[in-house]
Image: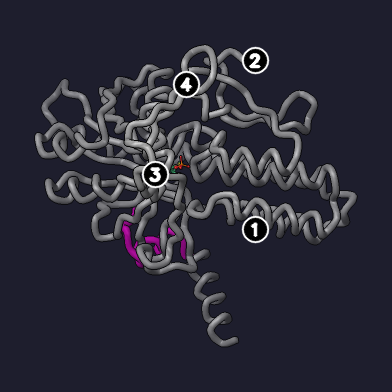
Amino acid sequence: MPDPVRIERPLWLSPNGWTVEVLDQTLLPGQVRIARLRSLKDAAQAIVSMQVRGAPLIGVTAAYGVALAMRSDPSDSSLATAYDQLIHTRPTAVNLRWALDQMQAHLSPLPPAQRSQAAYLRAAELADEDARINRQIGEHGLQLFRQILARKPPGTALQVMTHCNAGRIATIEWGTATAPIYLAHSLGIPIHVWVSETRPRNQGAALTAWELGERGVPLTLIPDNSAGHLIQRGLVDLVIVGADRVTASGDAANKIGTYLKALAAAAHKVPFYVAFPGTTIDWTLRDGIAEIPIEQRSAREVTHVAGMPPKGRRVEVAIAPPDTAARNDAFDVTPAKLITSFITERGLCSASARGLAGLYPDQARSSARSVRARTRR
Ligand code: MRU
């Protein structure tokens, strides 16, 4: 097993050149273990079980899932089956569909004999592209951080609040919301991060606290319920989160609880930023609340808490009476009007149709064309 501090990416190819190795995120922070994916089924299961999670990483894992499928059977029907199995693993993060579309468009025209090699190469390109894009998100976000810090008394740290894990292990490198945080910290800019635990799966406590802590970024873990209180007391300079799907009009789906932070931030005039790559935009949707599919997860994640001791098996304990009814919406939608600005690899823009189309005119035009074509049919 690699030394934990040497894990630069949460996904890589094994030295045999075809097995996909991933950091098993269900075991963090107690154990740093690697899971090996050797088939399409393994890749799909890794996404479903959340060994890998986070919108960009789900997309790249799916791309490698297609590569694994092509390695065992490069036929047209195998390609179609891979697409079909992977697209149904998790419903909200649109990066999954984007990555599968990329793979399908690249592989379908090729003769089957060339598909396996081409699939691995294309999946590696998607991974490298994600790392590069996130670094750019970081640079754009850093400029904002500097501006906000410049308005504070000299010598005080920038107080950043985040939610869930939009970090380097939710992507290939850097993270989205964490990219400017890592850059600022590496430049010696004083920064402190409020990390909300993110019930029910605790991605903030288990993953964000782990990865920021590993890089020495100062942080404080808080219960989800304290976010409004800290914002009200003036202890937060800005909120920055990631996204799983952003509509063409600027509504953003992200981990459940994001919307409450946006409401609190708006009430106290604290800027609220959403950082994401262009692959997170769903140009086919306009109304996020009505149209973005929200993943419904097991009630058991609400009625129980789970943890991972440094040794031994995952432990789960009940926190509610047996048979308590529970509902577990995994994401919520923050309407565009509550978002101060988007931070993307192409720069900053307002959370609006005009803002997104201004940064991505190519994609906005081609989606408008396909919507017109669909309505004519
Ligand atoms: O359910 P998860 O852990 O996959 O949810 C992750 C999030 O909501 C992230 O904020 C989002 O995917 C952005 S990751 C850069």
For mark 4, does the 10 Å Cα neighbourhood hold few (<14), some (14 to 19), or many (20 or more) residues?
some
Amino acid type of disc 4? Answer: Met
Amino acid type of disc 2? Answer: Met
Q: How far is the residue under mark 1 from the one under mark 2?
A: 33 Å
Q: Quadrant of the N terminus?
A: top right
Q: Quadrant of residue 125?
A: top right
Q: Is mark 3 within 8 Å of ligand 1?
A: yes
Q: How far is the residue under mark 4 from the one under mark 1?
A: 36 Å
Q: Is mark 1 within 8 Å of ligand 1?
A: no
Mark 3 or mark 1: whose residue is earlier in sequence: 1
Compared to 368, does 319 lie above or below? above
Range shown magenta:
348-361
Using residue 234 as the reference point, say whether residue 253 is left or right of it.
right
Q: How far is the residue under mark 3 from the one under mark 1?
A: 22 Å
Q: Is mark 2 within 8 Å of ligand 1?
A: no
Q: Does dot 1 land on a helix, a strand or a loop?
A: helix
Q: Which residue is mark 3?
A: 242
The location of residue 143, given as percent across then percent down, is: 31, 39
Q: How far is the residue under mark 4 from the one under mark 3?
A: 25 Å
Mark 4 or mark 1: whose residue is earlier in sequence: 1
Q: Quadrant of residue 185?
A: top left
Q: Quadrant of residue 64?
A: top right
Mark 1 or mark 2: whose residue is earlier in sequence: 2
Compared to 172, does 283 lie above or below? below
Q: Which residue is mark 1?
A: 101
Residue occupying image coordinates x 47% and y 23%: 315
Mark 3 or mark 2: whose residue is earlier in sequence: 2
User: Which label sits in the foreground, 4 or 1?
Assistant: 4
Using residue 214 as the reference point, say whether residue 82 is left or right of it.
right
**Image quarter where ligand 1 lies:** top left
Using residue 196 as the reference point, say whether residue 135 is left or right of it.
right
